[in-house]
Image: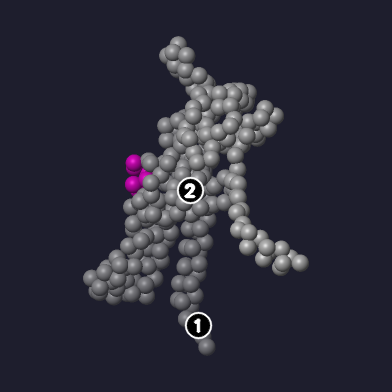
Amino acid sequence: MKINPIYVEYLILIVVTIVVISILVYLVRKALDFLIKKNSTLLNTDPTNFIFLRNSISYVLYAIGLFWIFHKIPYFSALGNAMFAGAGVLAAVIGFASQKAFSNIIGGLFILIFKPFRVADVIEISNSRVGVVEEITLRHTIIRDFEARRIVIPNSQISDETIINSSITDDKIRKHIEVGISYDSNVDHAMEIMKEEILQHALLLDNRSEEDKMEGIEIVPVVLLSLGDSSVNLRAYAWTQNVSDAFKLKCDVLKSIKARFDNEAIEIPFPHRTLVMKKGASAQLTENNE
């Protein structure tokens, strides 16, 4: 069977176009990556807009390649004309099938315009998912959590989320460190131990203003938070430079506080279970054991 040479030319045109566009996309993304990192560092600017533009260029270049193929191959041109003849039905079908895609694109544009978060921000969304915003594309947002896993969330979904942004204006974090002690323990002494252990930590940040210092506000306030069913609950407030430092400080001081409490007769209560057995049940249990 003889193959028509024109079909071979069309096939070569399609393959060459796809290869050229792929190489062009790769080179453009690499160049933009270099420019984004360089300019963001030199100018100290937010890279979010540039990263969104970089991801959008890929779609634009592939769309140009597709239109080029349709323009150069008569069969595809005729197919396009036939499709335009039924444009009303086609538009309805495509519109229905692409609702999610368009909503993701619109969601990405809203994120870009209103900036509820930016690339490199530490955010928390539903289900206590916390991580660093790594990339914002036309379709989705990628978040790297603190276990180095990537969470991919469609833009339409994340646009509807309630987001806790720890970096939107300031990276500093006030961490709450809570400990429960028994009612028999010395509350004042326990509060002093908590304060001393936090003050010794290298990651502690003095976030007081000059007015706060003049008024005698402490670096690490410790308060009696509540009187629970089985414990007196204490809370200390400690400032750190960022979320990672806050997590490390909390882990370290909980360990040192526990050690101090053990050495200085401050009891941390734990659940107790009391079993009350009737006399008949006790006798029956003894017979079964024998």
Across and down, in percent, residue 226 comes to 47, 34
Describe the element under mark 1 as helix, strand or loop. Answer: loop
- Vertical comparison of 88 with 62: above or below: below
Q: Which residue is mark 2?
A: 128
Question: Which residue is depicted at the point 55% across and 27% down?
Answer: 187
Going by the picture, which residue comes out furthest to the right?
290
Q: Main secondary structure of the magenta part?
A: helix
Q: Is residue 110 magenta?
A: yes
Please give left or right for residue 28 compared with residue 86 in the image: right
Residue at 43%, 59% (x, y): give it.
62
The picture quadrant where one finds residue 118 is top left
Question: What colouring method underlies this structural image?
Answer: one colour
**Magenta segment, which residues?**
109-114
Closer to us: 3 or 166:
166
Residue at far top of view: 214
Q: Residue beneath label 1, please?
A: 3
| Along the viewing direction, whichever of 227 and 96 lies nearer the viewer | 227
Q: CA distance from mark 1 to mark 2?
A: 61 Å
How packed mark 2 is, by other alpha carbons closer than 10 Å (few <14, some 14-19, many 20 or more), is few
Image quadrant in which the C terminus is located: bottom right
Q: Is residue 222 visible?
A: yes
> Residue 181 appears in which quarter of the rendering?
top right
Q: Is residue 265 magenta?
A: no
Residue 209 x, y percent position in the rendering: 45, 17
Work out whether residue 241 can be spotted.
Answer: no
For image coordinates 52% across by 21% down, the residue present is 219
- Give the class, few, some or many, for how many residues have Cα within 10 Å of label 1's Cα (few <14, many ≥20): few
Whole-percent x and y of residue 247?
57, 37
Q: Amino acid at mark 1?
A: Ile
Q: Nearer the viewer, residue 241 or 85?
A: 241
Question: Could you tell me which residue is drawn at 39 percent across and 54 percent down?
Answer: 157
The answer to whether mark 1 and mark 2 are in CB contact below 8 A is no
